[in-house]
Amino acid sequence: MRPTIPPEPKTAHDRPARLTPEPPPGRPPGPGQAALLAAAITVAVLCAADAVARSYPFGPRTRNVSDLGNQYVPFHAHLWDLLHGRGSGGLLVNWQSGYGVGFLPDLGTYLTSPFAPLVAVFPRDEIDLAVYVITVLKIACAAAAMTWLLLRLRPGRWWAAGLLGASYALCGWTVATASYNLMWLDGLIALPLLCLVGEWVLTGRRPLLGVLVVTAAWIANFYTAYMATLAAALVFLLRLCLADLPARRRLTAAARAALTFALGIGLAAPLVAVVYFGSAHASPGRFTQFARVDTEDLLARLLPTTYSFGSPALFVGTTALLLALALPFHRAAPRRVRAGWTLLVVAVTLSIQWGPTHLLWHAFAAPQGSSYRQTFVVCALLVIAAWHSLSYGPLDRRALAAAAGLLALVAVVASGSQLVRFFAWPVFLTAFVGALLGLLLLGRRRPLLRTAPAALAAVLLIGTLAGEATATSAVATRMRLGHMDDYAPWGDRQREQADAIAQADGWPRYRTDPGREQTVGNDPLEVGGQGAQYYSSHTSAVFSSTLTALGYGWTSGGRSLQSLDNAVTDAIFSVGARVHSPPDPHQNWFPQDGSGVTVTREDVPPLVTVRPSPATGAFGPSPYRNQELLLGARVYTVPRVTVLNGAGRPADRSTDQRRGVRVGGRATLTARCPAGDEVYLWAPHFGGSARLAGPTPDGLTGRFRADWPVTKIAAVQRLGTVPDSGRLTVELSPYRMGVVPDRAIGCLDTGRLRSAVRQLKATGATEVTVSGSGGTIRAELPAGSKGVAVVAAPRIAGWRCATGAADAVPAKQYHGLIAVPLDGSSTRVTCDFRPPGLRLGSTVGAGALVCLLGIGGFGVVRRSVTENFSWRYMRISVQLRKAWRILVGGS
């Protein structure tokens, strides 16, 4: 008997309610659509936040804070020049910065992201816009990658995966820390991709692609890739424990994962090794000691619109946080899943608060600057835990109530933190209510306002995330400007400097220095020329110590070297043209007059000079005597100096490591020098201004910037000319307690300097050429040259030199510069640069490639043999069955 089929309801009100919206015709939404949704939410939030904060490019406020303006934008500008065949140097040596520095370590640290070459499609004067677009694209790709991973881990609502993918990409770490350290954003993308590699390993899929993904992640930014690899390993091990696999298959999967990551990292070794050795030879810099943050501050960073430089930014959105907190109480999820992911989140969160494991996350090197760079790992785990909570079905009221209670407790504890400012509570409470309502709607069975609950929940939850993430990003953007140095984007100042340098440039006959009045720490990369300025994580210790001994100034613990406007050092380093700009108005220093950018030229020796003998002696405490040592002639008078305080009494002696007398208020320095000499003041630990008293034809105001404990020191500065009386007085106006050394004043005899320059020109190279890659410098010397040829470039590790047709040997050193002994018969000197670690890295990379090809070839042969054997076996089996049937039938 057939079952009775009820008649179709005739009216819409008679039809039964649907629990989900009617699926559209065709293929249902998949990972691709979810990833696009996550990327769209991310881009919209980032642009809206910058518009709210009135930040570039949606407002007048610059976004070039800290290292973004000092390092990353100039390095991308240099990449633009290289891609368009401009600039001094190439991939091996960057001759624009630091009088010649290795470029591959900087390339591997800042510019090997697959997004970096996009700068080439923008105009050169829109380099700030190019960097902004790259930043937004990276964060959007991180959202898409996390969305794809979530749907690979567990099936679920596509829009919810997109929502949580955007929550990850817009986490507090991204908007507060990584948005202006854009190379770290490659780690934000790498983490979900490396977790996907783990999933492929578990299922035995895409072995070659998995290796290539690991390689790409480590090449893009090995620093954050290291953290992402640790996180992916933890996720993989947990997935392995939760999988219902026999022990043998688990061991096989673990071995396959280790091999995949080893081969991937091995293929990246040529670049990673160069970066590692570049860091090993770098100036120590200034590293912060680890200090655990208070519990209330840690929990406060889970809430929206909180900001601080020295605490982990754990914000992932209230919806994701509620879901993660609800996971232990969500009875629809298996107990092992609830326990495993909850314990992993708690363990990793605690690990960033304990010194040994904190160092482990940072590759056992204490970070310089922001301490909690591994925070994106915790944010990723929170989002993955939230997805596991949601993918097992809507939360029941018990789980949702428990999560709401825990989040309320977090808010109560966090209220004791100063990081939770008054405007945080309205944003948090609105997001809290919105997230609760949205999650409640997901569990509703009946339609609301004739609309499916899931559709309303999607709108409400996405709107909640967009609102709180926009507010959090806008607050971070505004507060960074109050806590960090900031720099103006490309404008008229840089354009005038670049034009002046282009007209004066004569490289490699001489250098053109962008000038003492810098705009950013890497001015030569941004506006051109070949100067001393250089700011990088790979600033060599040799370069830093040499220039410090000569009276140069620096910041960032010696990793950001500044230019020095000094006639002697210009002669030493062959600076034949120097740009003079008014102080940068953006730094609240205003020019003394209405003059613009000007260029002065000097007659200087060539880049390669000949000295009669190898270096003797060593640098001493006086920069004036050290300059004479490198120049090879006595040109300074260094008089005794009397320092009187504002009351006319002798100043007190310094009681700390700084040698000299203490100056805390207005003071005067008096000394006697030959009339007509140029007056220079050396006060590395003095902060304030100095001026030569009395009527001088070119009286200048020297601005000194130093601090204590030492993170920056001031450069030697020219103050004017010694008056006819020979007695000079320098007036000091400090803005903080400082120290002035005993032999602070040096008086330069310009006549003696001209004589020394003529001698160096007469015996120096007649022609100097530099290869297109920048890694080879050749000099033609006068016949019969004896002694030692000195290249006006720091003797960093990697230089090898030869005379004539002889074999190249490691270069010698002449007081920190490259030196080549001469035999009197050769008239050609050739120096080649090979980045340290390149040979080792290439060997490891070649070995990894051979192993990968061997494994791939073995797999192909094995499959071929297996398929051939199976085919032959099938044919034989068929023939045997036919014969048997014939025999049986015949009998």
Image: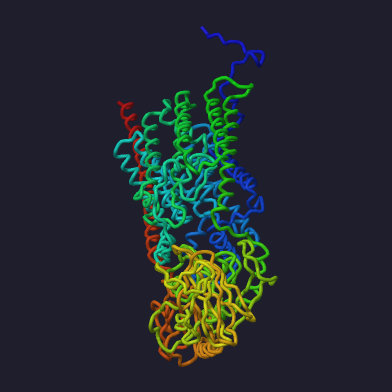
At horizontal 61% and vertical 22% (from top left) the residue drawn is 448
List x then y, in percent, for residue 699.
62, 77
At horizontal 59% and vertical 31% (from top left) the residue drawn is 460
Marks counted in the figure total 0
Can residue 40 be seen in the rendering of this structure? yes
**Residue 714 versus residue 38 in the image, above or below:** below
State the colouring used for the structure image. Answer: rainbow
Quadrant containing the C terminus in the rendered view: top left
Residue sticking out furthest to the top: 1
List x then y, in percent, for residue 532.
52, 72
164 and 638: which one is in front? 638
**Residue 889 versus residue 121 in the image, above or below:** above
Can residue 89 be seen in the rendering of this structure? no
Residue 813: which quarter of the image?
A: bottom left
348 and 653: which one is in front? 653
| Left or right relative to 230: residue 512 | right
Residue sticking out furthest to the right: 594
List x then y, in percent, for residue 67.
53, 58
List x then y, in percent, for residue 878.
36, 35
| Left or right relative to 289: residue 636 | right
Residue 435: which quarter of the image?
A: top right
